[in-house]
Amino acid sequence: MTTNPAERLVDLLDLEQIEVNIFRGRSPHESLQRVFGGQVAGQALVAAGRTTEGDRPVHSLHAYFLRPGRPGVPIVYQVERVRDGRSFTTRRVTAVQQGRTIFNLTASFHQPEEAAFEHQLPPRLDFPDPESLPTVVDEIREHLGELPEALERMARRQPFDIRYVDRLRWTAEEVKEADPRSAVWMRAVGPLGDDQLVHTCALAYASDMTLLDAVRIPVEPLWGPRTFDIASLDHAMWFHRPFRADEWFLYDQESPIATGARGLARGRIYDRAGNLLVSVVQEGLFRRLAS
């Protein structure tokens, strides 16, 4: 039985091929109302990657979350081979659960080429090293004394070590003073192997874990009682450079706008040297919970 959370993540991303273009993914039994969106995105990207040939890494994905998935129920991923060109490969993936489409993803793969030129804006701030920061679990324990049972279970199964660059805010006064920004250091809690597709799909999984924090930060404590029901609506990623998801990466996140019950968040993922690895954009739905 796999007990290491990183190994469980790799196992979760190891889909069963049931036809040439059809794959089946597990959906763990969780005490959640819906399947975690990062899981569906990561598994769909695995399905797309399994139908490509040659050394063509993913360079972008665009996805829509259409319906909430049910935990504990397998998800079938149907891949359409849209294009196999000399430089680019395009795949469209439909995720189906109990006969209903819950998710759509289009992914593009690019044959590596020598760059005619390169440039990059530097990170917006000089961030502290991850080793100097407490884990999110330690921060919550410091504030609450001990973790609630649900959080304790989640912490044991968490495949990523998450460390917030700014201390978590716990009071209404602290929240009101906050800008809609959040930054975290992350890495898988154990080795993920050497398959670049696994690292790409693992990072797709991780990219959905904290991105909408930036929308919530000026509204409510991130780890306090929720006042909103939150659902991811769509998700887009651009992969600029190779990386390992089991090495520290910085996820710098901001929300330029929240209106009409929707909040937009943008993320930039850097390695420790400040190289931009991935760009992310996501929109989420925020509906106030009934009191």
Image (cartoon, grey):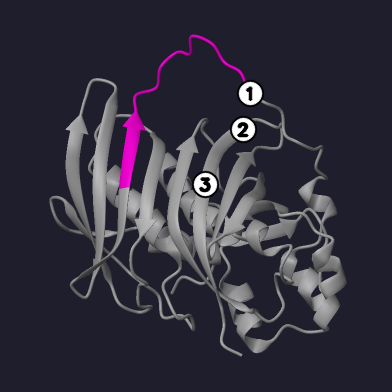
Magenta region, residue range:
106-119
Front of the two marks 1 and 3 = 3
**Foreground residue, 138 or 253?**
253
Q: Amino acid at mark 1?
A: Gln
**Foreground residue, 272 or 191?**
272
Q: Is residue 114 magenta?
A: yes
**Foreground residue, 206 or 174?**
174
Where is residue 168? Give x, y as percent. 79, 65
Residue 211 seen in the current view: no
Q: CA distance from mark 1 to mark 2?
A: 7 Å
Mark 1, Cα crowd under 10 Å, few <14 / some 14-19 / many 20+, is few
Q: Residue at x 21, y 24 (%)?
A: 85
Q: Secondary structure at mark 2?
A: strand
Front of the two marks 2 and 3 = 3
Dominant secondary structure (helix, strand or loop) of the stretch shown in magenta: loop
Q: Amino acid at mark 3?
A: Val
The image quadrant that residue 90 belongs to is: top left
Q: CA distance from mark 2 to mark 3?
A: 15 Å
Q: Amino acid at mark 2?
A: Leu
Q: Circle 2 sits on which residue?
A: 276
- The answer to whether marks 1 and 2 mark residues whose Cβ atoms lie closer than 8 Å is yes
277 to the left or right of 73: right
The image quadrant that residue 26 belongs to is: bottom left
The image quadrant that residue 94 belongs to is: bottom left
Counting the numbered discs, the total is: 3
Q: Secondary structure at mark 3?
A: strand
Which of the labelled discs sits on residue 281, or is there none? 3
80 to the left or right of 144: left
